[in-house]
Amino acid sequence: MGHRDIPVLETERLVLKGPEPQDYPDFKATFTSFRARYMGGPLNPYESWMLYAAEIGHWEIRGFGMWMIHDKTSDATLGMAGGWQPAMWPERELAWIIWPEVAGKGYALEAVDAARRYFYKSGWEGAVSYLDPYNLDSVRLAERLGCVKDKEAKSIGDDDAVYRHPAPAALNDTQLSHGIAMEVSHYQDPAFKPKGFALD
């Protein structure tokens, strides 16, 4: 898949586009910070650069990958979300990261929901998310997306938990899909001020 062939996804507030070289400083700022502690970080500048190169190259190798999440109004980057399956990953993963300064606005929920629906329409029959069990924000987000902890699934390390996403049929005009859509719509309302909600 050529770089120009990466699909563009749009939601009410967001545009998901393939990672571009000019987006790297925003990526580096997060992955070299404490925010990346649950994803093998903080990384040094070289490790951050190598990971970003992998984000771009993953689309070429696998035919799918992570999108850069952009604010539809300002085009500012907000984080990344999408598919991820580097070497040694047992299954396709849905992954996400939101820049710390824009966390808590439901961007990850909106972006991952859009990415998952795209992949399912493209033929994926399911996915997992490999999460640090101490990363409670991501665990709660996975649960809000309908994921269930799969203790039997093969993990990618000794300290991660595998959360299995519902199959495509479970998101086809179901109570779960309606609930996700309702929560996303709440976050899209400028007057909505969540209390006690998980970040992202």
Image (cartoon, rainbow, N blue to C red):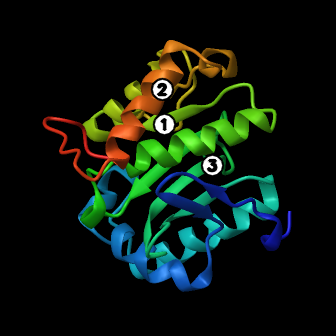
Q: Choose between 183 and 34: the one closer to the eye.
A: 183
How many residues crowd around disc 2 within 10 Å: few (fewer than 14), some, or many (20 or more)? many
Which element carries disc 2, helix, strand or loop?
strand
**In the foreground, 169 or 44:** 169
Quarter of the figure that contains the N terminus: bottom right
Q: CA distance from mark 2 to mark 3?
A: 14 Å
Residue 170 position within the rendered picture, expressed as x and y whole percent measured from the top left: 61, 15
Establish if 186 lies above or below 173.
Answer: below
Q: Earlier in the sequence, mark 2 or mark 3?
A: 3
Q: What kind of element bears circle 1? A: strand
Residue under numbered circle 1: 130
Q: In the structure shown, which secondary structural element does the residue marked by tag 3 occupy?
A: strand
Q: Amino acid at mark 3?
A: Trp
Q: Determine contact: label 1, label 2, CB under 8 Å.
A: yes
Q: Please tell me which residue lies in front, 178 or 93.
A: 178
Q: Is residue 198 left or right of residue 82?
A: left
Q: Residue at x 24, y 38 (%)?
A: 198
Q: To which residue does mark 2 refer?
A: 163
Residue 70 is situated, as x and y percent measured from the top left of the image, at 50, 67
Amino acid found under the numbered disc labelled 1: Tyr
Q: Who's the residue at 75% across and 59% down the image?
A: 7
In the drawing, what numbered circle is on residue 84?
3
Q: What is the distance, in whole Å, between disc 1 and disc 3 at their CAs?
A: 10 Å
Visible residue check, residue 25: yes
Amino acid type, mark 2: Tyr
Q: Residue at x 55, y 85 (%)?
A: 22
